[in-house]
Image: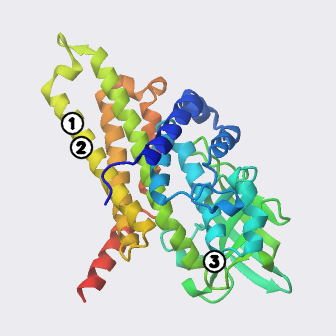
Amino acid sequence: MQFALNEDQIAIRDMAMAFAAEKIAPHALRWDEEKHFPVDVMREAATLGMGGIYIREDVGGSAMTRFDAALIFEALATGCPTTSAFISIHNMASWMIDAYGSDTQRHTWLPKLCTMELIASYCLTEPGAGSDAAALRTRAVRDGDHYVLNGQKQFISGAGGTDLLVAMVRTGGDGPGGISTLVIDGKTPGVTYGANERKMGWNAQPTRAVMFENARVPVANRLSEEGVGFKIAMAGLDGGRLNITACSLGGARTALDKALAYMKERKAFGKRLDEFQALQFRLADMAIELEAARTFLWRAAAALDRKDPDATMLCAMAKRFGTDVGFEVANHALQLHGGYGYLSEYGIEKIVRDLRVHQILEGTNEIMRLIVARKLIEGAR
C-alpha cells in the first residue's frame, strides 16, 4: 500500500489543482446557473494530458495509472465537481476503446479523444434498466455490414453536446451475454436527443435521453466480439466508481475549506465560530471522515492498477463510503454557514447539489452494498 505520494504524483496533483483554481473555480457558479457546458476549458485540460489520462501513449494518451487519475479528479473537483465528473466520463468511454478496440479503432478515434477535439458519452442506462443494467432493451439487428439500432438511453451525460456515443446494445438474447458495445457517431441519421433535463445539480453538463430509430451503425464500430458488451461496461464502471469518489472528495474538500474560512470570520455570542468546542469537534470529524475516505480510495485505486482479484469489491466499497462521506461533509459545511450556506453566492449549496447524485450514479450505493455482500458470501462458501 502507498500512504505517501512520490514526486511525480505530487506534481500531477498540483498541476490539476492549479488548473482547477485558475480555469474552473472562478466560473463554476456561473456555469451552474447558466447550464453552460465548458467544452473550451475541458479542451484546455486535455492539453495537460487530462483528456486521455490512462490511455496508451501510441494514440496520444498520458498512460497514467488509476491512482494518478484519482489524484487528478479530486483536484479538478475542488474547482467544480460537475466539470471534473464529466472529464471522468469522457476518460471512461475513451478507455473502453483503448482497452477493447482493435488497432484500427484505437487509431481512428483516440488521438482526437485524447485532445478532446472529439468528446465521448457513455450510454448504458435506459428508462427501464438502471441498476439492473443487464436488462437493457436497445436492440441492434445485423443487416449486412451495419447494425440497425432501435431503442432509448436515459440520463446520458453530455448527450447532444458530444461527438461519440459508446453504447451498450442488445445484439443477442436476454441477459448479459446478449449485450455488445458500439461506438456511434453522435450525428448518425436516426439518432436524436431529448430535452436537457432539469436537474438538482450537475447543471454544467447536459443530461439528455438518446433515441435510436433505425439508426445504421457500421459493424466495424463494434468493440471486441458480440456478447462482450456487459463485461466492457462493468470493467469501465470499476474505474468510474473510483473517479466519482474522487470527485466527491474534491467537492467536499472545498466545502470544508469554505466552512473553515467562514468560521474564522463569523462571530456569535462574542466569540468566533471556530472558538466553540462543539463546532471544532464537527470540523474535526469532517476532516477525519475525508481522510479515511481518501485512504480507502487510494487503496482501491492501487488494487485496480495491480489487477487485484478483490479490486471490484474494493472499488464498490470505496464508492459507497467515499460518496456518502463527500455528501455528508458538504452538507455539514452548509449547516456551519447557517442561513448563508443556503445562498448560492457562497458556493456551498451548489456543492451539496452536485455531490448528491454521486450516491446514485455509477451504480447506486445500495448496489455497491450488494456487490460487496455477494463477494463476501461467495468467499464464505
Q: Nearer the viewer, mark 3 or mark 2?
A: 2
Residue 7 left/right relative to 21: left
Residue type at mark 1 is Ala
Within 10 Å of disc 2 (Cα), the crowding (few <14, some 14-19, many 20+) is few
Residue at 42% across, 62% down: 364
Residue type at mark 3 is Arg
Decide which of 351, 59 is in the foreground and name it.
59
Q: Which residue is mark 1?
A: 284
Q: Secondary structure at mark 1?
A: helix
Q: Is residue 351 above or below residue 207?
A: above
Q: Give how far apart the Cα atoms at labels 2 and 1 are.
A: 6 Å
Within 10 Å of disc 1 (Cα), the crowding (few <14, some 14-19, many 20+) is few
Q: Which residue is mark 2?
A: 288
Q: Secondary structure at mark 3?
A: loop
Q: Is residue 290 above or below residue 177?
A: above
Residue at 61% across, 64% down: 95
Q: Which residue is mark 3?
A: 137
Callouts 2 and 1 close, C-beta under 8 Å: yes
Q: From the top left corner, tell me how far across and down residue 24 is, in percent.
A: 57, 33
Q: Secondary structure at mark 2?
A: helix
Does residue 200 appear in the picture of this structure?
no
Q: What's the image's color scheme? A: rainbow
